[in-house]
Amino acid sequence: MNTKVYSTKSKVQLMGIKNLLDSEGIECFELDNSDSSYAGLFGHYELLVKESDEKKAKEFISKFQSEN
């Protein structure tokens, strides 16, 4: 089962976090919940990881966000 570890309205932020997790060997899946008719105004993007990687992924995300 997959678990949500990150959510944002910014595709750029999503890709940055996705690249971070990929570089750490954590497989992640992107979920686009945005309304394509109103780009950036409604909805959001989510990153999902395997349940077994959830804790490690959240730790990397938290560390990354505290450094930036």
Image (tube, helix red, strand yellow):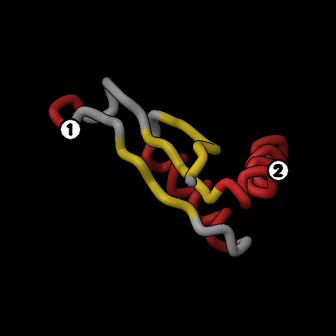
Which quarter shows the C terminus?
Answer: top right
The image quadrant where one finds the N terminus is bottom right
Residue found at x 53% / y 49%: 47
Q: Seen in the image, is 59 located left or right of residue 26?
A: right
- Which residue does the image show at 52% across and 36% down from the upper left? 8
Q: Quadrant of residue 16?
A: bottom right
Say if 59 sits above or below 34 in the image: below
Q: Is residue 65 left or right of residue 43?
A: right
Q: Nearer the viewer, mark 2 or mark 1?
A: 2
Query: Residue at 48% of width from left, 50% of height from top?
Result: 12
Locate residue 23, reporting x and y percent.
68, 73
Q: Is residue 44 above or below residue 57?
A: above
Disc sitting over residue 36 in the figure: 1
- Amino acid tagged 1: Ser
Tag count in the figure?
2
Q: Give x and y (percent) for residue 50.
A: 62, 59
Q: Give the structural element (helix, strand or loop) at label 2.
A: helix
Q: Secondary structure at mark 1?
A: helix
Q: Position of residue 63 (x, y in %)?
A: 84, 49
Q: Are marks 2 and 1 in contact (CB under 8 Å)?
A: no
- Is the residue marked by circle 1 packed among few (<14), some (14-19), or many (20+) residues within 10 Å? few
Looking at numbered disc 2 in the image, what kind of residue is underneath it? Glu
In the foreground, 21 or 50: 50
- Provide the residue designation for mark 2: 59
